[in-house]
Image (cartoon, helix red, strand yellow):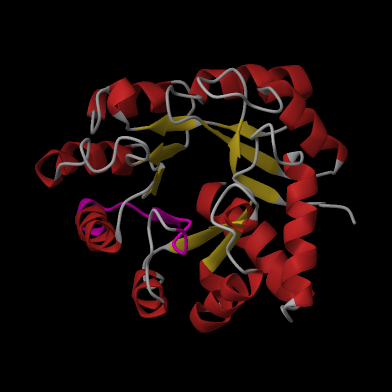
Amino acid sequence: MKLEGFVDTHIHTAPDVKPRLLNDVEVAEDARKEKMQAVVLKSHAEPTSGRAQIAEKLTGFRVIGGVCLNSSVGGLNAGAVEAAAGLGGRFVWLPTVSYPAAFKVEELEEVVNAVSEHDMVLATGHLKAPDIFKVIDAALSAGVKRLLVNHPLTRVVGASFDEQKEMSRHTYLEHCYVACMPGHDRLDPEVIADAITFVGSGSCIMATDFGQQHNPRPVQGMKMFVKSMREQGLSQKDINRMCVENPSRLIL
């Protein structure tokens, strides 16, 4: 199985404060060999915008970075968003490991305005559903056009199917295969397939969230995810929509 044209919107790479399986360049090389379209590098601790530029130059493959607004970069810090944009970053993730302490609704306006000004992707990180809806409202008011809800089915987010359906009116929903793995949520792939069917593949994105040392390489994780979703009855057309078309529209 080749991953031609695929985009993985969620990969963790070295260097990092946690052990990672591959560095930025190794992930890009793996994806290039599979003829993928792009990969997105995420770190909970530091911006990946500059690192993505280096990896892209070294490999000739499209590598995208951004910034996750955890306490390590000052939380909801519009200055960090501006810096990421200046370095070519495309993604702004709201707090993950620092949620809920680093998430303050009153500080959201400057962040969403900066995201809108630079036409970046605003991703919801580890926010719970009530805060996600607050973010969607603020983002739409600011003119943000690219919204992504990260792994809605996992324990850290826990959005219901009905909440996901409501979110999908304005956002893409990113389902990550890492949630199905031992050492993580051990989520039944059938639940992901059911959520995709309920919401519609036109509003969903498949990603891996791989990069941990105890999991396979991200490209292998994506192949595992595709195989799993096909076994659950999703069509190849659905797969292509979620792995090629939707992430392309979101990012590129």
Q: Quadrant of the N terminus?
A: bottom right
Which one is nearer the viewer's eye here, 155 or 165? 155
Is 144 within the magenta? yes
Q: Which residues lie in the magenta part?
A: 140-154
Which one is nearer the viewer's eye here, 218 or 61? 218
- Depicted 48 relative to depicted 127: above or below: above
In percent of the image, x 18 and y 37: which residue is there?
Answer: 110
Q: Is residue 76 left or right of residue 189?
A: left
Q: Is residue 154 left or right of residue 38?
A: left
- Depicted 168 relative to depicted 6: above or below: below
- Depicted 236 relative to depicted 182: above or below: below
- Residue, far left: 106
In percent of the image, x 41 and y 22: which residue is there?
Answer: 86
Tell me residue 190's x, y (percent).
Answer: 63, 75
Tell me residue 77's x, y (percent).
Answer: 23, 28
Which one is nearer the viewer's eye here, 236 or 115? 236
Tell me residue 202's x, y (percent).
Answer: 56, 73
Which one is nearer the viewer's eye here, 184 or 100? 184
Tell me residue 4's x, y (percent).
Answer: 82, 51
Q: Is residue 3 left or right of residue 107?
A: right
In percent of the image, x 60 and y 47: which residue is there?
Answer: 183
Is 52 within the magenta? no
In percent of the image, x 20 and y 54: which residue is there?
Answer: 138
